[in-house]
Image (cartoon, rainbow, N blue to C red):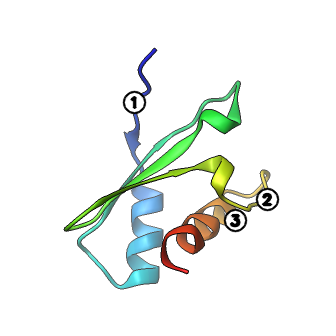
Amino acid sequence: MPKYANASAEATAFLSERTGSSQLECFTYIDPEQAENSFFIVKTSNKVIHVSFAEINFDPTNYRSLLEGLYRSIYE
């Protein structure tokens, strides 16, 4: 079954603030039954980046922790 990511205004705002770039957009797919199937798509001016939640170290009870982990996965 195809998985469709939805635009994530919160993730876009978070990454834009952290990077200083207005040229990016974030999308997310969250699978409530199997977290390992969840992922982010980050579209920048020159590339598209796929980051699985399984690749991110984060506190599963804290969404901000997930966004910080996304930032680390891409930019650090």
Q: Going from the N terminus, do you reach mark 1 or mark 3 first?
A: 1
Element under label 3? helix
Which residue does the numbered mark 1 point to in the structure image? Answer: 4
For the point 59% across and 74% down, the residue is 72
Q: Quadrant of residue 32?
A: top right
Which amino acid type corresponds to the residue marked 2 in the rendered image? Asp
Which amino acid type corresponds to the residue marked 3 in the rendered image? Ser
For the point 23% across and 71% down, the residue is 23
For label 3, the crowd category at 10 Å Cα-Cα, with few meaning under 14, some 14 to 19 and many 20 or more, is some
Element under label 1? loop
Which residue does the numbered mark 3 point to in the structure image? Answer: 65
Above or below, 63 against 7 in this view is: below
For label 1, the crowd category at 10 Å Cα-Cα, with few meaning under 14, some 14 to 19 and many 20 or more, is few
Q: Quadrant of residue 55?
A: bottom right
Q: Going from the N terminus, do you reach mark 1 or mark 2 first?
A: 1
User: Where residue 3 sits in the image (x, y, percent)?
Assistant: 44, 26
Above or below, 3 against 5 in this view is: above
For the point 41% across and 68% down, the residue is 13
User: Where residue 66 sits in the image (x, y, percent)?
Assistant: 65, 60
Above or below, 32 against 62 in this view is: above
Q: Quadrant of the C terminus?
A: bottom right
Mark 1 → mark 3, Cα distance in angstroms: 23 Å
Q: Going from the N terminus, do you reach mark 2 or mark 3 first?
A: 2
Which amino acid type corresponds to the residue marked 1 in the rendered image? Tyr
Number of labels in the image equals 3
Which residue does the numbered mark 2 point to in the structure image? Answer: 59
| Discs 2, 3 touching: Cβ within 8 Å | yes
Mark 2 → mark 3, Cα distance in angstroms: 6 Å
In this view, which residue lies farthest toward the bottom?
Answer: 20
